[in-house]
Amino acid sequence: MLNSIRNKTKGWVAYLIVGMITIPFALFGVSEYFTGDSNIIVASIGNDDISKEAYLKEFNAIKRRLQKELGEGYTDDINSELRPLTIQSMINRRILNKLADESGYAITPRELWMFIQTNDAFKVEGKFSIDKYKQLLRLKGFSDIEYESIQTEELIQNQIKYNLLDSAFVTPLTLKRMQSLNNQQRKFSYIALNIEDYTDKAEIDPKSVRDFFDKNKQIFFEPQKVKVNFVELSTEKIAKSIKVNDDNLLSLYEDEKALFSTEEERKAQHILVESEELANTIAAQLKQSKSFTKLATKYSQDKSSRDNGGDLGFFTKGTMVPEFDAKVFSMKENEVSAPLKTSFGYHIIKLNKIKAAKTKTFEVVRSELTKIYTEREVQKSIYKLTEQLSNLSYELGLEEAAKQMDLEFEVSEFFTQDTRKYDVKFVAAAYSDVVLNKGENSKLIELSKDKFMILKINKKITKRQKKFDEAKLEITKHLSSLLAKTFIDKIANKISTSLNAGDTGVVQKLIDEYKLKWKDVGWVERGSKQEDIGIINSVFSLPKPNNGATYGAQSLNKQRSVVLKLSAIKVSKGISDDILSGVMLNFESEELFDSILRTLRKNTNIEIFTDRL
């Protein structure tokens, strides 16, 4: 009972909404200093509006997370696709919030708090720490209210999804068919052919190269390139300039002593029953020196603690319901309480241990204080310094601004608009109309939460048509690849056809001539990573062998083709019906959830102002 919410939430992660972009637990940075978008509306959902400020805050947080994960793989295309995905996700959440309100879904403060306590990020030595919780929120830029509001919203939406699971069902026939497919294993071998082994044998007619160039001149060009001057301001550099002394640190230590203190914790057991009469009976047995642990295991209705003899572990003040909390924190070690009534029923409590509050000394946390002090001073300085960089760059130019601010004046290499060498924001600014065509400084670019930059064109090379001699080698390679691919496809198909026809002589001749080899893979499951996924999928698409083996040829991509030999099929025991049924039920609930969401969107007046995104 007291911990039932904790148990309930453990499974909610499995029902997160497919396709929804959740708000990451990340530092949003200081971009809000430079946006005045709180009054600009980017989308309307009925009478509910989404401001550009809210949209940018979420978009930029997700973008930074993806840039960090993908690195140079984060492309302009991804950036373009992320904008509509973000706003659609925000709209879906607003619609679901409205459904939750109308349907009476709610998360109580206690349920929320119990859920937050399950987050490993807030634990110290396996136990929830209120100090670490507050410290992490502070460091990540969240207020308690903001973070808990986000968690409440997500829990309510997942509650909707969780309840839909009960509405889904799987027929025995479907389950049996899926079990058979899921548990199937296949034994196979294959011959791989790669165009790299045959391009040098492709004879390309010089006239065909010239003809190809004449017909496709528009695709052979040297793209536009630019070189830029830039000045970078980083929080790392700002941090190095900040001087820290003991007076600063002592003052911070006194102001933030709570960050370095642990609250008093108490460890207790309890027995929870419904009736006061039973509670009194148990209390009487305890007075007769009966084992508290055995009585808790026998009588307690709190399933989450009953099997552990009613043990609730260590917890701080404010964790339990008020009546329970007040009682525990007024007891002495080894004291057993009289029956206590709360909204859950009647409790008998035994206080086992008291862990006193502690505060780390100044010397112990000096390095941590230095880091916190420096980070805060950096944040205080950022706005002033970025504004100074912008003003000096505009008034005196980048080189002089760099000198006056003791920053490095840098020059990039030439780069194209689709380069992966530089940050996407850097490239976008370099190719913006203001910089590229008007020759002005860029606006201040926030590359990340700790790096800012201003740039200006140094030199540009315009796009130009390549001459035939420049494109000749590229075209020859391209045509050679096409011929080589046609060639290996032909060989693979001939081997497969001959094998299915029983003509082993032709097959052996081809294998000898082109020095091919069979690779014996053996038994694999449908989701095996033992070989390329294209090969595995092709093997599982082949018909069942009747006598001997089944053969097939498959073009995997522009580079490779394979000949497949399926020797045998078997069905293993695999996962249990209960587990597979759970997976199928979850899939059904996903489909039902998506259907409901589509209906809700259809019946809601939604307007998106794409030009404002």
Image: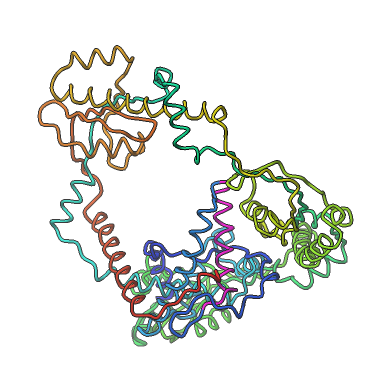
Pinpoint residue 14: horizontal percent, then vertical percent: 37, 61
Picture quadrant of residue 243: bottom right
Q: Is residue 603 left or right of residue 79?
A: left
Whether 196 is among the magenta residues is no
Out of 611 and 147, give the one closest to the viewer: 611
Q: Is residue 289 left or right of residue 523?
A: right
Q: Looking at the image, which is closer to me, 128 or 235?
A: 235
Residue appearing at x 84%, y 57% in the figure: 397
Is 71 in the magenta?
A: yes
* Magenta segment boundaries in residue numbering: 50-72
> Quadrant of the rendered structure where residue 275 is?
bottom left
Residue at figure coordinates x 58%, y 68% from the top left: 56
- Quarter holding the N terminus is bottom left
User: Does residue 521 appear left or right of residue 360 in this picture?
Assistant: left
Chosen colour scheme:
rainbow
Q: Main secondary structure of the magenta part?
A: helix
Q: Residue at x 62, y 74 (%)?
A: 143
Does 454 sit above or below residue 513?
A: below
Q: Nearer the viewer, residue 533 or 194?
A: 194
Residue 584 placed where, x, y %? 25, 58
Give the residue drawn at x 10%, y 27%: 547
Residue 288 showing in the rendered view:
no
Q: Where the C terminus falls, by quadrant? A: bottom right
